[in-house]
Amino acid sequence: MASDSASCILLTGVTGFLGKVVLEELFRRRKEFAFGKIILLTRPKRDSDSKKRFYEDVAKSPCFSLLPAGWTNSVQVISGDLREKRCGIEEEIYECICKGVTHIIHCAGSIRFDLPLADAAAANISSTLNLLELAQKSPRLRRMASTSTAYVTPHTSGPIDEVLAPLPQAAALLFSDIQQGRVVEAELLRVTGHPNTYTLTKCIAEHLLIEQRGSIPLTIVRPSIISASWHYPFPGWIDSQAALAGFVALTGSGLLHVVDGNPNTLLDIVPVDEVARRLID
């Protein structure tokens, strides 16, 4: 990311594990990036608006404990829902964001394996395309980075190249069929080879991003299983219970004393701060 005091970064998914670490990395390296402000697009909940969610659930996290006081003064929390038109943002605010944003880092989405196909598509495909539309309306935009997963390619014994995983039909047609309820989830997963709706919808999202990005400078980052931090915000930090994270938390807290496993097994694990760095750099 280039250094420029006029830079304005739009970050999604800050209430999640990865999003927090991306935000911490940006502020920890602020002298390097010299950005003006960071816009955080956050979805409100029934009992908590977007600003309350940020200041109570995010800003107080130990993830930010080593940042200097007052770091939140450079944050602007915007209420929205990426699944909706204009990302669920009020029209006037949406237009203002489009005029000023220079970088977009997309960490939002659902990592649940058991979501019904239509819900997973809304969380991982519709949200990404709506954000891409915002990017295309932003004349100052220099770069968009989007988080995917290494598992967009169904399990294979060989190496996985940095290419789009094949789909049984054009991604746009497949997405339309999903939205219209014209596909049977189990049958589609069988045909594509994906083990769940999470990896399938991330795969379709990648295709549509590439097909529809136009001139947008785009980076797609494909982490494997994201786990505890290596260095930042400090070694071993984790606040997620998803996937392997629960196992790590139980082991680190001393609640899990013995693990019966194969010492020769290679685990697809990547530290969260390494993923954050790839999204930013």
Image (cartoon, rainbow, N blue to C red):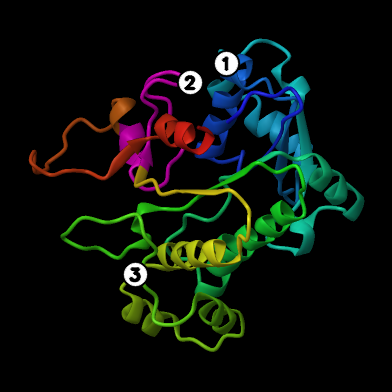
Q: Decide: marks 2, 3 in contact (CB < 8 A)?
A: no
Residue 157 seen in render: yes
Q: Looking at the image, is mark 3 or mark 1 nearer the viewer?
A: 3
For the residue pair 126 and 137, the one nearer the viewer reads as: 137
Q: Residue at x 35, y 54 (%)?
A: 162
Residue 95, horizontal then vertical, whole percent = 86, 50
In the image, residue 239 above or below residue 127: above
Residue 136: x and y, percent? 71, 56
Q: Helix, strand, or loop for circle 1? A: loop
Residue 270 drawn in magenta? no
User: Considering only order in the chain, which callout, 2 or 1, is on the residue closer to the N terminus?
Assistant: 1
Image quadrant for the N terminus? top right
Q: Which residue is mark 1?
A: 65
Q: Nearer the viewer, mark 1 or mark 2?
A: 2
- Magenta residue span: 226-250
Res 101 → quadrant: top right
* Outermost residue toward the bottom in this view: 182
Above or below, comparing residue 148 to residue 59 in the picture: below
4 left or right of 65 in image:
right
The amino acid type of the residue labelled 1 equals Ser
| Disc nearer the start of the sequence (2/3) | 3
**Residue linked to disc 3:** 194
The residue carrying mark 2 is 233
Mark 3 residue type? His
Determine the main secondary structure of the stretch shown in magenta. loop
Q: Does the residue at mark 1 contact the one at mark 2 (Cβ under 8 Å)?
A: yes
Q: Looking at this view, is 281 or 155 the one in front? A: 281
Q: Residue at x 51, y 80 (%)?
A: 174
Q: Label 3: few (<14), some or many (≥20) within 10 Å?
A: some
Query: Residue farthest to the right?
Result: 92
Q: Element type at marker 3?
A: loop
